[in-house]
Each structure stands twice: as structure tokens, then as C-alpha cells.
């Protein structure tokens, strides 16, 4: 019986305390606000400023963040079998690794992008990958493999009649030939230099 009375007392107290149920006083009605005059919009013309283009220097931390972002995107696209987009992601990763002078990783990602672009019949990307791959291989010192990649890219570009790519390939071939001659001269000089490490 006591519990029933306590429950009834609490119910009545909670209903009377609620401001949503009962309002004993009347609220005053405020007068309407006067109409605001419409302001005429006039565009403000910016002053003519000549922007100074400063080279964007990205630090190691920025490159690592960008690498991680592109890596996650590539994993996502491979997981959901969006191979055409993943091929471009792998190319972007390779280019980031080239900027970081991590040439073996760059070479691997160019190869991955190249494999996928061949499967997707994306010849433009395949040619671009072969040109970039040849540049990485020549920086590593694999001049013969770089030459083979450029010959293959030239064949594909000639098949489609893409002159811009042909000119880029020829420029890369000349650069590789120059690097090969310069490297051979350096090796010749190093082998003919006297050894100072002899012990008497």
C-alpha cells in the first residue's frame, strides 16, 4: 500500500513539474518587427595582383603522407577489382618513389602498372609506363633493359601512329645512349687510376 501511494505521489509531482503540460501565466505578445530595407548587392572587384609563383618544395613527410594515401587508394581499387584505376594508382606510387630516389620500389610499381594496363588494353598508359620504366632502369644502370623497353614502346606508338609519344621515346633513347657512353668513360677512368691502397 505504501509503495502504491509513493508511486501515485511521484506521478502527480512529475506531471505538475513539467512545463510542457501546464502553463499558468500568459506570455506577452511582442509587436512585429519593422520590414528591413533591401540592400542592393554590389560586387567588390578585387585589385589586380600579379601572383608570384614559388616552387612547391615538398618535404619527406609530405611525400610519405602522399605515398600512404595513394597506397591505400591502390589497395582499395585492387580489392574491389577496379583495375583500370589501380593501374594509374600504381603509376602514381612509382612516380612518388622516383621522387624519393627509391628506384627499386619505383621499378616494381611501374611493372605492376604495366601488367595491369596491358590487361586492360590501355596502350597510352603502357607506353608511358615503359618510358618511365626505362628511365628508372637507366638510373639503376640497366641500359640494355631500358633500351628494350623503349624499343617495345616505340613499336606500340608506331602501331597507333602517336607522334608525340614517338618523339618522347626518341628523346629518352638519346638520353640513355648518352648516359651509357658517360658511364663507360667513367668506368674506363676508374680502372686506369692508380691504386693508392698498396701497403709497402
Image (cartoon, helix red, strand yellow):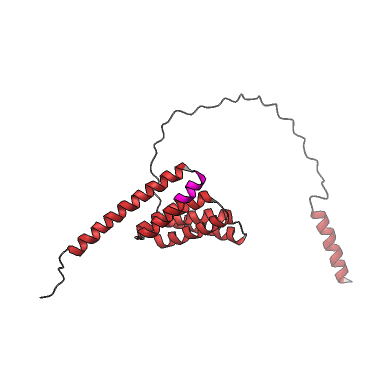
Picture residue at 87% right of the left edge, 71% below the top: 2
> Can residue 181 be found in the magenta stretch?
no
Residue 155 visible in image: yes
Q: Main secondary structure of the magenta part?
A: helix
Q: Where residue 1 sits in the image (x, y, percent)?
A: 89, 71
Q: Give the extent of the magenta segment.
A: 154-161
Left or right? Give the position of 44 relative to 133. right
Left or right? Give the position of 36 relative to 25. left
Farthest residue to the left: give it: 200
Pick the quarter of the image with the C terminus.
Answer: bottom left
Farthest residue to the right: give it: 1
Picture residue at 60% right of the left edge, 62% below the top: 79
Left or right? Give the position of 134 relative to 189. right
Q: Quadrant of residue 5?
A: bottom right
Q: Where residue 24 sits in the image (x, y, percent)?
A: 82, 46
- Residue 134, placed above or below residue 23: below
Left or right? Give the position of 20 relative to 120. right
Picture residue at 82% right of the left edge, 62% below the top: 10
Compare residues 63 and 26 and report the one nearer the observer: 63
> Can residue 160 be found in the magenta stretch?
yes
Compare residues 164 and 42 and report the one nearer the observer: 164
Picture residue at 58% right of the left edge, 54% below the top: 120
Q: Where residue 85 sits in the image (x, y, percent)?
A: 57, 53
Q: Quadrant of residue 32?
A: top right
Amino acid at each position: 500500500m505504501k509503495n502504491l501511494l509513493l508511486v501515485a505521489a511521484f506521478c502527480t509531482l512529475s506531471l505538475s513539474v513539467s512545463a510542457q503540460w501546464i502553463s499558468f501565466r500568459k506570455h506577452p505578445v511582442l509587436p512585429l518587427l519593422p520590414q528591413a530595407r533591401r540592400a542592393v548587392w554590389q560586387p567588390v572587384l578585387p585589385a589586380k595582383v600579379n601572383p608570384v609563383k614559388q616552387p612547391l618544395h615538398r618535404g619527406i613527410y609530405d611525400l610519405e603522407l602522399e605515398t600512404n594515401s595513394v597506397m591505400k587508394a591502390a589497395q582499395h581499387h585492387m580489392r574491389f577489382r577496379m583495375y583500370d584505376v589501380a593501374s594509374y594508382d600504381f603509376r602514381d606510387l612509382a612516380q612518388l618513389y622516383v621522387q624519393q630516389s627509391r628506384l627499386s620500389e619505383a621499378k616494381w610499381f611501374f611493372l605492376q602498372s604495366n601488367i595491369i594496363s596491358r590487361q586492360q588494353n590501355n596502350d597510352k598508359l603502357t607506353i608511358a609506363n615503359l618510358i618511365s620504366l626505362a628511365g628508372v632502369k637507366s638510373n639503376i644502370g640497366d641500359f640494355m633493359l631500358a633500351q628494350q623497353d623503349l624499343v617495345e614502346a616505340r613499336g606500340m606508338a608506331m602501331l597507333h601512329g602517336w607522334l608525340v609519344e614517338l618523339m618522347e621515346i626518341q628523346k629518352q633513347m638519346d638520353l640513355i645512349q648518352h648516359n651509357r657512353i658517360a658511364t663507360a668513360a667513367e668506368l674506363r677512368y676508374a680502372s686506369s687510376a692508380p691504386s693508392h691502397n698498396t701497403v709497402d
